[in-house]
Image (cartoon, helix red, strand yellow):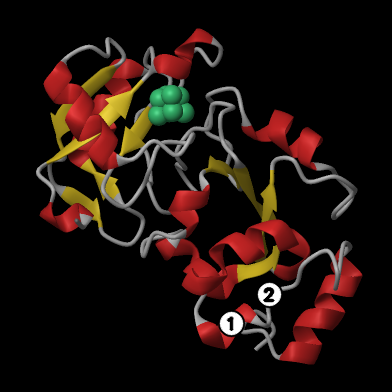
Amino acid sequence: MKEEEAKVFFAHTQCQRFAPNHVCIITPERPGCCGCLYQTYQEKINEGKDEYLSQFEKGECLDPARGEYSGVNNAVTARSNGKHSRYFLHSMFGFPHASCGCFGVIAFYLKGVNGIAIVDRKFEGRIFGTTAAALRKRTGGGEQQEGYLGISVDYLKSPKFLKADGGWSRVAWISSSLKEQVSEVIPEDIRGKIATEAEAATVPKLKEHLKKVGHPLIK
Ligand code: SF4
């Protein structure tokens, strides 16, 4: 199912136990930060046993590329202790989805190449002057952090993955274990051009790689 076909989306607040203002919005094309899927919550809502789960009318689509909906903004305002009032479901800029701490993947903006890097939360070693552990801290906590997103592997497989930011064409770097996992959903024309730790772990090296392979970011 596509977001356009769904009448209702889900909100889940279980992670407010450790990330006080966190609200996950789950749509058919955006799983929760932990990877919980729309279909799962559809079943759970019928059972009525999850006190943290609610459904709401998605409302008017205010921005189809960023994934901004009036119903999402209302739901987030009502459930985040007034902390958040707008979510862009498919962008890491402006009003990105908040990140709690359960995410398996961190997507972050790499200013040096005006691109996006995607790293497995368990990645070991230094990349771009930081580590996955430091990125986890920077990203989580239930706040909206422009340029930092805690997401699930399944969101990488969504046709709407960071659509407003350029999707896969904007991705400059991905950790090799993740690249392997989602290889089949990365468009063929870009797959070989996205660097991993084997090609680059610093911005100068990454720039060199992007130039060499003719990544769209360089063009
Ligand atoms: S990360 Fe998962 S458990 Fe936590 S609020 Fe989001 S959907 Fe719920």
Q: Position of residue 143 (x, y in %)?
A: 54, 27
* Relative depth, front residue between 103 and 209: 103
From where the camera sits, is residue 72 visible? yes
Q: Where does label 2 land, which residue?
A: 194
Structural crowding at the residue carrying mark 2, measured as other residues with C-alpha within 10 Å and reported as few (<14), some (14–19) or many (≥20): many
105 in relation to 142, above or below: below
Residue 110 percent location from the top left of the image = 72, 59
Q: Do the CB atoms of the residues marked 2 and 1 lie less than 8 Å apart?
A: yes
Q: Which structural element holds mark 1?
A: helix
Q: Is residue 218 above or below residue 15?
A: below
Circle number at residue 190: 1
Query: Which numbered circle lies on residue 135?
Result: none
Distance from the alpha carbon under mark 2 to that under mark 1: 7 Å
Q: Is mark 2 within 8 Å of ligand 1?
A: no
Q: Which one is nearer the viewer's eye here, 181 or 68?
A: 181
For the N terminus, the image quarter is: bottom left
Q: Position of residue 201 (x, y in %)?
A: 87, 62
